[in-house]
C-alpha cells in the first residue's frame, strides 16, 4: 500500500489556506510522524514559495517514513523535454520522486492544450522516460481520467499505458471534477485493468497493481470512492489531511487510512502511527488556521460523543455497544453529552468522566438529572460547559452544602459614552470572601470585561492564583424563540490556565447577568479545581 499525501499541494488549493514556507515544513514533519509513505511538497518553479520550500527541505527535513515528492507537468507540446524550464525546475528540486500531471481526456488535450492526441502521448512518454533516466521514481496523475474514459475509453486508457510503458511506477486515475460514485469507480477500474493488461502484456492483476486513485469530494464520496478503488486492487491512493482541497475538498487522509486499516485490516501505516491521528489532524488544522471540524469522522471531538439517553444506558454496560471502534485506537476519546435528552445513565457516566461518583447515591443522581432537565428547558446548555455541570453535580451530591470560594452581595455596571467618542465601562462588585466583605471597582472596554476585572480585584488578595486564569473565549447566543432586545441570551466562557481549559455557561434575559453567571462559575471552578489537585 502506498499512502500518498498531497496536503501541501492539492490541499493548499482550499479557499482561505495560504501556507508559509515555515508552515509547509511543519506540516511535512507532522505527516511524516503520522507515517504516510509519500509527501507531495508542491510545484517547484511555478511559485517562488514552493521553490524556496524545496530548497529548505533538502537540509531541514529529516523524514523517517515518507518519500519527498515534487509535482509538475509533462513537457510542453512541441518542446524538447531537456529544454522545458518547468521540467528543469522539477529536476532541480532534487526529490527522490516526482509526480507528473497529464491530460487524459481527449477533449482537454485538444481544447485546453491545443495539441494532438499523438503529441500528448509523446509528451507523457518523453517526460516519464527522462525522469526515470535521471534516477527518479515517477508517478503520473491522469487528470480528468474518469470523465475522459466515459467520453473515449480507448484514448484515456492509452495515456495510462504510455506512462507505465515508459517506466512510471503508477498511473494515478484522477476524479478531477469529483463527480464519481463508488460503483462507477470500481466498474471503470475493472475495465481499465483489462485494457492495460493487453496493452502492457501483463496479467490483469499485475496491471491493477500499477494504478493509483485520486478523488475530489464534489459528491461527498471521495473517501468512499478511494476505499472502493483500493478494494478493487489499486494499491496507491492520494489524500489530503482533513480533506482539504479545492471546492468541497479531497479524500480525507485520516478517514481513508482508518477505514482501510481498522475496517479492512490492511497494514497501511507503520506500527504506532495511527494513534497519532487526532493530534496530527488538529495540529495541521491549527497551522492552516482552520478550526478543527468537531464532527469529522474518527478525529472530531464529537466523533464519539453521545447525547441520547438510550446510547448512554448501553455504553454504561459496554462502551463498544454504541462506538464503532475504541476511540483510543486513533487517539480520540468518548464523551457523554449532558442535555435535555440525558437520562440517569448519561448523567452518571458524565459525572464519572469528570471525577464525580453519583453511582452510589441514587437520590443525588435523581436531583442532578432533574436539575439538568429543568435548566435545559429554560435555555441552559451543559454539553459544551463541563465545568458548570461539574459544579452543579458536586453541589447536589453534597445536598447543596458545598461552599463557594466567594458569595455575591451585589454588582453594578455603568457605561459612559464621553464627548470625545470614547466608551468606558465601570463595574463595582460587592462580595464576601472568607468572612470578609470586599468592595472593588474596575474599568474595562465593555461591561463584561469591567465586571471580570472588578471581580478579580476583589478576590486576588485572597486567591493570588487568579492571576493565572485568562479568558480564552466568550460566546453569546440569542436563544431560539426569543426576539428583540429583550431576548434570552446564553453565554459561554472558556478559561485558560495550567492544565486543560474549562468552559462555563450562563443564561438570562440580561446579557450582563448571563455573563456574570458564566464568569462566577469560571472562577469558582478554577479555584476549586486547584484545591482538588
Image: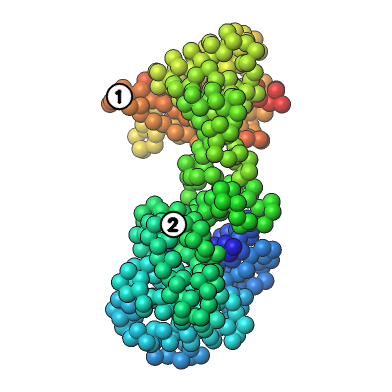
Q: Position of residue 382 (x, y in %)?
A: 49, 25
Q: Is residue 432 above or below residue 257?
A: above
Q: Is residue 137 above or below residue 76?
A: above
| Labels in figure, total | 2
Q: Position of residue 266 (x, y in %)?
A: 60, 55
Q: Nearer the viewer, residue 476 or 1?
A: 1
Q: Is residue 210 visible?
A: no
Q: Which residue is mark 2?
A: 225
Tell me the SS state at disc 1: loop
Residue 403's label in the rendered image is none
Residue at 51% x, 58% y is 231
Residue at 54% x, 50% y is 259
Q: Is residue 272 visible?
A: yes
Residue at 39% x, 30% y is 477
Q: Position of residue 80 (x, y in %)?
A: 46, 91
| Measured Cα–Cα span from mark 1 to mark 2 | 42 Å
| Quadrant of residue 112 within the rendered picture | bottom left
| Marks 1, 2: nearer the viewer | 2
Q: Is residue 245 above or below residue 351?
A: below
Q: Which residue is mark 1?
A: 481
Q: Position of residue 224 (x, y in %)?
A: 45, 53
Q: Nearer the viewer, residue 336 or 324?
A: 324
Q: Residues within 10 Å of mark 1 (few under 14, many from 20)?
A: few
Residue at 44% x, 14% y is 374
Amino acid at each position: 500500500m502506498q499512502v500518498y499525501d498531497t496536503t501541501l499541494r492539492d490541499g493548499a488549493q482550499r479557499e482561505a489556506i495560504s501556507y508559509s514556507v515555515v508552515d509547509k515544513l511543519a506540516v511535512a514533519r507532522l505527516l511524516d510522524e503520522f507515517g504516510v509513505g509519500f509527501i507531495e511538497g508542491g510545484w517547484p518553479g511555478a511559485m517562488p514559495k514552493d521553490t524556496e520550500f524545496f530548497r529548505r527541505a533538502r537540509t531541514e527535513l529529516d523524514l523517517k517514513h515518507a518519500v519527498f515528492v515534487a509535482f509538475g507537468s509533462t513537457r510542453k507540446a512541441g518542446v524538447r523535454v531537456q529544454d522545458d524550464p518547468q521540467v528543469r525546475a522539477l529536476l532541480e528540486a532534487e526529490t527522490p520522486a516526482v509526480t507528473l500531471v497529464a491530460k487524459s481526456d481527449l477533449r482537454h488535450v485538444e481544447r485546453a492544450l491545443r495539441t494532438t492526441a499523438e503529441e500528448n502521448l509523446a509528451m507523457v512518454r518523453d517526460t516519464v522516460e527522462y525522469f526515470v533516466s535521471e534516477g527518479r521514481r515517477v508517478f503520473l496523475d491522469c487528470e480528468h481520467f474518469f470523465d475522459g474514459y466515459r467520453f473515449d475509453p480507448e484514448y484515456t486508457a492509452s495515456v495510462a499505458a504510455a506512462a507505465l510503458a515508459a517506466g512510471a511506477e503508477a498511473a494515478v486515475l484522477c476524479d478531477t471534477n469529483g463527480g464519481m460514485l463508488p460503483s462507477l469507480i470500481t466498474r471503470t477500474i475493472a475495465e481499465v485493468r483489462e485494457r492495460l493488461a493487453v496493452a502492457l502484456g501483463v496479467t490483469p492483476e499485475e496491471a491493477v497493481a500499477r494504478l493509483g486513485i485520486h478523488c475530489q469530494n464534489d459528491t461527498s464520496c471521495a473517501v468512499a470512492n478511494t476505499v472502493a478503488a483500493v478494494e478493487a486492487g489499486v494499491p496507491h491512493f492520494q489524500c489530503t489531511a482533513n480533506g482539504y482541497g479545492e471546492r468541497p475538498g479531497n479524500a480525507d487522509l485520516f478517514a481513508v487510512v482508518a477505514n482501510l486499516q481498522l475496517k479492512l485490516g490492511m497494514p497501511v501505516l507503520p506500527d504506532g502511527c495511527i494513534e497519532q491521528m487526532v493530534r496530527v489532524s488538529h495540529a495541521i488544522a491549527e497551522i492552516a488556521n482552520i478550526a478543527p471540524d468537531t464532527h469529522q469522522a474518527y478525529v472530531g471531538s464529537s466523533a464519539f460523543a453521545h447525547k441520547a439517553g438510550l446510547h448512554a444506558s448501553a455504553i454504561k454496560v459496554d462502551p463498544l455497544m454504541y462506538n464503532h471502534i475504541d476511540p483510543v485506537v486513533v487517539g480520540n476519546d468518548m464523551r457523554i453529552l449532558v442535555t435535555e435528552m440525558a437520562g440517569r445513565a448519561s448523567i452518571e457516566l458524565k459525572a464519572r468522566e469528570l471525577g464525580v461518583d453519583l453511582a452510589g447515591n441514587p437520590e443525588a443522581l435523581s436531583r442532578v438529572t432533574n436539575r439538568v432537565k429543568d435548566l435545559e428547558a429554560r435555555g441552559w446548555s451543559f454539553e459544551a460547559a463541563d465545568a458548570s455541570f461539574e459544579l452543579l453535580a458536586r453541589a447536589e451530591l453534597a445536598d447543596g452544602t458545598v461552599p463557594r470560594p466567594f458569595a455575591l452581595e451585589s454588582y453594578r455596571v455603568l457605561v459612559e459614552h464621553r464627548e470625545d467618542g470614547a466608551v468606558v465601562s465601570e463595574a463595582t462588585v460587592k462580595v464576601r470572601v472568607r468572612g470578609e466583605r470586599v468592595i472593588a471597582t474596575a474599568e474595562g472596554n465593555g461591561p463584561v470585561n469591567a465586571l471580570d476585572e472588578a471581580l478579580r480585584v476583589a478576590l486576588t488578595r485572597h486567591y493570588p492564583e487568579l492571576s493565572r486564569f485568562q479568558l480564552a473565549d466568550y460566546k453569546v447566543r440569542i436563544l431560539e424563540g426569543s426576539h428583540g432586545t429583550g431576548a434570552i441570551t446564553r453565554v459561554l466562557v472558556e478559561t485558560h490556565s495550567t492544565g486543560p481549559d474549562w468552559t462555563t455557561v450562563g443564561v438570562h434575559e440580561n446579557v450582563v447577568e448571563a455573563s456574570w453567571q458564566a464568569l462566577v462559575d469560571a472562577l469558582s471552578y478554577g479555584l476549586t479545581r486547584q484545591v482538588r489537585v
